[in-house]
Image (cartoon, rainbow, N blue to C red):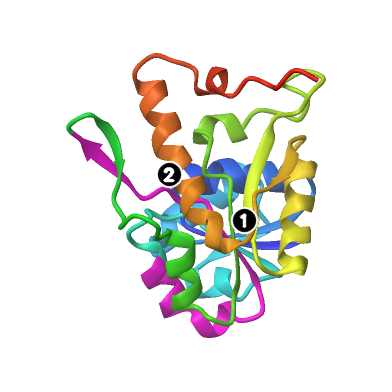
Amino acid sequence: MRIGVMGTGAMAAALGGAWARAGHEVFVGGRDGAAAAALAGRIGAAGHGSPAAAAAYGEVALLAVPAGEAPALAREHAAALAGRTVVDCTNPLEPGPGGVMLSIAPGRSVAALIGAAAPGAHVVKAFNLAHSSVWERPAGAFGAVPPAVPFCADDAGAAGRVVELITGMGWSPMPAGGLDRAAYVEATAAFAIGVWWAGGSPRLAFPEALA
C-alpha cells in the first residue's frame, strides 16, 4: 500500500516507520523539508517532500499533526485527499485543573472536523489511544494476544485499508462504529492519558465479563 504521511513528529515517525517495516511504501511530507528528509531516511521511507506531495501520494494519507492544525491542513489539501483514506490519529487535549481535558466541544470530534474540511475524503479515526513509543514496538511484542486498535469509519473500503495496516503491525482491529462515534474514542484518550499520568493502568478498568 502507498501511504502519504503528513507530518514529521513522533506519531509520523512511529506509524510511518511501522508501516515501512511492514512493507508499505511510505512518503513523508512536511513543511520543513530538512525534517521530512531526515525522517524519511530514519524510517526507510520511499520518498519525502511537501505536505501536498504526501496528500497526493497514495491510497492512504496519515494526518500526523497537532489536533488543532489537522482540519486546516485537510482543508488546504482537500482536492488531493478526495477519494483517499485519511487516517486521523490526533487527540484534542489540553491540561485542565483536574487533569487532561478535551479541547473540543462535547460531542464533536477532530475526525468529523477533518471530514467537513475535506468532504471528498474517507476519514478514519484510529491509532490515537497509545503513546507514539508503543507503535514502534515490533509485531509480537505484546505476547500471544495482540492488543486492539479501535477505529471509526463510514466507508467500507477505507475501513478495510486501515484493518490491513493494523494487522500488518501485529495488532488486532477493533471496529468502533461510524465516524459519528469518533468523539467517544477521542474522549477515551483523555480518560486513558489522565489515568496514565496519575500512575494507573486504564486497561484495568475494563475487565472481561464472566461467561
Tell which residue pokes out farthest to the top in this image. 199
Q: Is residue 57 above or below residue 25?
A: below
Does the magenta segment cover residue 85?
A: yes
Q: Nearer the viewer, residue 198 or 19?
A: 198
Mark 1 secondary-structure assignment:
strand
Range of residues picked out in magenta: 71-96
Q: Which mark is residue 187?
A: 2
Return the x and y of residue 123 as percentages of the image width and height. 59, 66
Q: Which mark is residue 152?
A: 1
Return the x and y of residue 180 as percentages of the image width and height. 54, 62
Q: Nearer the viewer, residue 176 or 126?
A: 176
Whether pointer 1 and pointer 2 mark residues with C-beta atoms closer than 8 Å, the reply is no
Amino acid type indicated by mark 2: Ala
Question: Which residue is located at x 53 percent, y 34 percent?
Answer: 130
Q: Nearer the viewer, residue 64 or 109?
A: 109
Question: Which residue is located at x 66 percent, y 47 percent?
Answer: 44
Left or right, 130 with reference to 99: right
Left or right, 168 with reference to 114: right
- Dividing the picture into quadrants, the one containing residue 69 is bottom left
Question: Which residue is located at x 50 percent, y 78 percent?
Answer: 118
Mark 2 secondary-structure assignment:
helix
Task: Judge the density around disc 2: few (<14), some (14-19), many (≥20) Cα neighbours within 10 Å.
Answer: many
Amino acid type indicated by mark 1: Cys
Which sits earlier in the primary sequence, circle 1 or circle 2? 1
